[in-house]
Amino acid sequence: MNGQDLFKSMMVLGIFDSKEDSKTTIKKLLEQLWEYQEAEANLMVEIATMQYEDGDTKNAIGFLEKSVEIYHELGFTEQEAVILDLIGDVYFNMDDTQKAYDHYQHSFKLCSKIDTPLKEEVSNKIQELEDEIEALKEKVEADAADASLKTESQKSGYPESVDEEKIDYEELGRRLDDIIGFLDESAVYGTYQKYKNPMGRLKEAYEMAVNIGDEKGEAALLLIMGDVSLKAEKTKNSLELFTKSLNLFRKVGNEKGEAISRLMIGTTYFLLGNTDEGSVYLRQSMEIIKSLKDKDIEKAALALLNSIYG
């Protein structure tokens, strides 16, 4: 069918009114499309609200994020900012401060462009989270300072472990994975954790790295193996793996790897009940992370600390 025949067919179907030129008709059709898209986005927000009230948080966030995409495409900046703020509230109620903070920041940037009254409300939420993060930093530093004042060493072994009911191990596991994800090698070796027997795969990769003299790869694999061991509640074994990883990262001069290793060691000591030693490693880790000037790692590290200290 050529262009003329196609146009005639569209005329028959009533898509084009013969009394109007094509530019006018296209404009009307686009306006209708935008109305449909806006209605779709509004409907998604309603569905998300009902899902959230029913406890289906995951799908609620999914629908809200889809509505954000539509509002962004339509250029509805105010609506986009409102939904981003709402998503931040959902994450805040889930105690996921990092994602809540990110969404509040995004919402605030949009609010600043259009100068909406929502700007002040979002700004207050951001300040609240920043105060919470700063308080957590101060707690870590205070615990480390207390540890340095104690001169008596432990008589033998590790002290009694902390009350497990106070620690959300599922959340802690997610935080550990987030931290390890910042390693350059994690994209290659991190996939091994998806297998039924991840430790077997990781050991094979580790032996290969040793044979070819890839010390950076060895260090990354030891870190991931320690993570797997920790999730399996083989805490002392994970501490040994993390320590070996730290030594290798220091040897090759990888500050990011060293910071992550110290963070893992501090976490493990904390789980073993040795909060004094753990606080020292956590403080050292945060000092290195701060020097790296990588805000993403710092946010993830603080989220992990929040899981530990509550």
Image (spheres, rainbow, N blue to C red):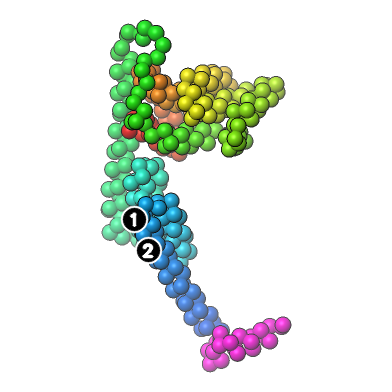
Compared across the picture, whether 302 is left or right of 256 comes to: left
| Image spot of residue 164 (x, y percent) | 36, 28
Could one spot residue 253 in this view of the protein?
A: no
Location of residue 28 with respect to 18 vertically, above or below: above
Identify the residue shown where x is 63% and y is 28%: 200
20 in the magenta segment: yes
Q: Which residue is disc 2 drawn over?
A: 46
| Image spot of residue 9 (x, y percent) | 64, 87
Identify the residue shown where x is 28% and y is 43%: 128
Farthest-out residue, bottom: 19
Q: Which mark is residue 53?
A: 1
Q: In the picture, which quadrant includes the C terminus? A: top left
Q: Which mark is residue 308?
A: none
User: Badge 1, how many Cα within 10 Å: few under 14, some, many 20+?
Assistant: few
Task: Looking at the picture, tell me which residue is in the foreground, 296 or 242.
Answer: 242
Compared across the picture, whether 234 is left or right of 1 comes to: left
Magenta span: 1-21
Give the quadrant of residue 247: top right
